[in-house]
Image: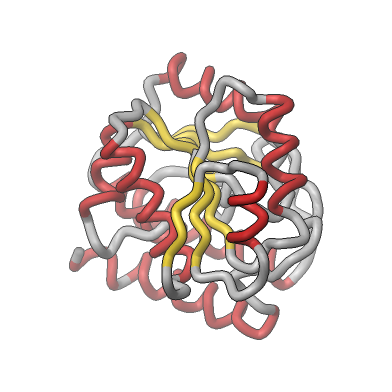
């Protein structure tokens, strides 16, 4: 399990303790993405497996570091899991089970697999991205912005070795077009416990626009 963390001193211990209490058989690694708070010190104090990046690389860099680690350790699957407490460990096993039952390349922990999106600017953006993925790939992804994703060995190799692969919706579209099988499993998520999101409110709109442009145009040149 890959846990990217940037300035998560207020949530990292509770997140990992919850994970170990519910999914104790799952290996994990915290990727401290150049935090300037006490995230690193707390991980070391509690004995959490840790890779510390000297500078902040952003979510893509932290995630790819974790994928390179998973590839080096020869794991069959790797799960992206938020350090802020939003993801619930109880849903890990259903995602693993879905991967083995369907032979999927990627399993998405979906907030909307069985329900509708509430109305907000962010959900409008998510709906637009879903529509563009459907338009360009023919595949319906109800929760393309979910950060809780399980990747099989083939996807670990792809994300570890291809420099322009980030854990973003445009990469999902790219993988689908390259023949990857993606399924969604219904999950619930919580509000973040504390800490800083990789995206501020002011960055959300530009992020959504960038992803849309990438899916429509840039992905065809990768």
Q: Is residue 90 left or right of residue 30?
A: right
Farthest residue to the top: give it: 101
Task: Give x and y (percent) for residue 104.
Answer: 39, 27
- Foreground pick, 26 / 182: 26
x and y, in percent, of residue 18 in the image? 74, 35
The reply, left or right, for residue 26 in relation to residue 113 is left
The colour scheme used here is secondary structure
* Residue at point 69%, 70% (across, down): 196
Quick one: 135 or 174, which is closer to the camera?
A: 174
Residue 42's spot in the image, x, y percent? 67, 55
Residue in the picture at 56% in, 27% down: 95
Picture quadrant of residue 46: top right
Residue 113 horizontal/vertical position (percent):
65, 37
Kindly indicate the quadrant of the structure image that contains residue 74.
Answer: top left
- Quadrant in which the C terminus is drawn: bottom left
The one nearer the camera, 97 or 133, is 97
Identify the residue at the far front of this view. 45
Q: In this view, does 20 lie above or below 196?
A: above
Q: In this view, does 160 lie above or below 128?
A: above
Q: In this view, does 152 lie to the left or right of 16?
A: left
User: In the visual, does 17 lie left or right of 60?
Assistant: right
């Amino acid at each position: 399990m890959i846990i990217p963390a940037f300035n998560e001193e207020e949530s990292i211990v509770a997140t990992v303790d919850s994970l170990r209490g519910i999914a104790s058989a799952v290996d994990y690694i915290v990727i401290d993405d150049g935090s300037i708070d006490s995230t690193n010190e707390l991980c070391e104090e509690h004995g959490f497996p840790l890779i510390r990046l000297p500078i902040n690389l952003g979510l893509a860099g932290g995630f790819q570091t974790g994928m390179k680690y998973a590839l080096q350790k020869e794991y069959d699957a790797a799960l992206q899991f938020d350090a802020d407490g939003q993801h619930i460990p109880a849903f890990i096993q259903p995602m693993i089970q879905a991967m083995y039952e369907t032979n999927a390349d990627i399993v998405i922990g979906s907030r909307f697999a069985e329900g509708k999106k509430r109305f907000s600017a962010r959900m409008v953006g998510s709906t637009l991205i879903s529509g563009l993925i459907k338009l360009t790939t023919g595949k319906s992804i109800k929760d393309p912005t979910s950060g809780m994703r399980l990747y099989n060995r083939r996807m670990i190799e792809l994300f570890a070795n291809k420099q322009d692969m980030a854990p973003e919706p445009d990469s999902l579209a790219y993988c689908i077009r390259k023949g990857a099988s993606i399924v969604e499993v219904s999950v619930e998520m919580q509000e973040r416990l504390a800490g800083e999101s990789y995206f501020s409110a002011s960055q959300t709109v530009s992020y959504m626009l960038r992803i849309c442009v990438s899916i429509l145009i840039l992905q065809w040149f990768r």
